[in-house]
Amino acid sequence: MFSRSEDEVAIRFSHVDKTYRLFKNDRARFYSVFNKRVKHETIHANCDLSFEIKRGEAVALVGNNGAGKSTALKIITGVITPTSGTVDVNGRVSALLELSAGFDMNLTGRENIEMRGFLWGLNKKEIAELTPAVEEFAELGSYFDQPMRTYSSGMKARLGFSFASSIDPEILVVDEALSVGDKRFSKKCIARVKEIMSGTGVTVLFVTHSSSAAQEFCTRGLVLDHGRLTYDGPIKDAIEFYDKSNNM
């Protein structure tokens, strides 16, 4: 359906920093536009972060809450930009992150898939080919043609996963998205991710707090701590390093 990138490196971070300024309240934030001396706290979400992920690799991003994993993912998916440094992303990114984000609750599931398809640059023919597969995988029945405001949170997530995993990604970013719905549907999601990973040249970046899940999907691990890369190596060694660091 899509032309695929031939670049050997799928993702490259070069000395990436991402900082946030936290103010006491909205008034202080407003005044800071005119006065740089307004007191604030600086948070370094990513610090001098450098790594390369080659096409076809399956890499786990490991770290405690606040380690900078989500910030790195948001940079990769284009949600935010780095404060300094450079990031190269070569290929179509499909993100299994906040699965229900971006939907219009007044539109039906079918209409939302059409809208998302257009946002992805698909034409009407491609959307028409994609929609039945999304509908079948999501298992929403007649709700697929009902406004999404009538959906449960699980139904929204199932539709989001079905779309994001059906668009022939070159780079698949997964962040704790495999617990969608009941156990049977969760197993179905895991099988879908494995199917995508088996495709030639598909790059996977997997973020999880589960060591077993990381080792099931990935061959390499990047360990982050307070925004910095502290270990990069085979997944088994990365998990051992992470576990040892937490037990010190």
Image (cartoon, grey):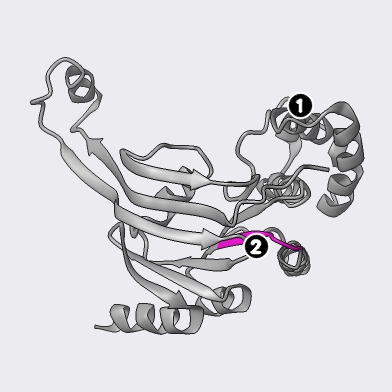
Q: Tag 1, which secondary structure? A: loop
Q: Nearer the viewer, mark 1 or mark 2?
A: 2
The residue under label 1 is 107
Point out the stretch of residues depicted in magenta: 200-205
Name the one closer to the observer, 80 or 148.
80
Front position in the image: 8 or 113: 8
Q: What x and y, as percent, mark residue 55? A: 61, 60
x then y, percent, for residue 79: 49, 37
Q: Amino acid at mark 1?
A: Leu
Q: CA distance from mark 1 to mark 2?
A: 25 Å
Q: Is residue 27 magenta?
A: no
x then y, percent, for residue 46: 31, 51
For this orientation, the residue located farthest to the left is 37
- Quarter of the rendering containing residue 20: top left
Residue position for label 2: 178
**Residue 123 versus residue 161 in the image, above or below:** above
Of marks 1 and 2, which one's residue comes earlier in the chain? 1
Under circle 2, the secondary element is loop
Could you tell me how many numbered marks the image carries?
A: 2
Three-letter amino acid code at the position of disc 2: Leu
Residue at 64 percent across and 64 percent down: it is 56
Q: Quadrant of residue 113?
A: top right
Question: Residue sitting at 70 percent across and 45 percent down?
Answer: 160
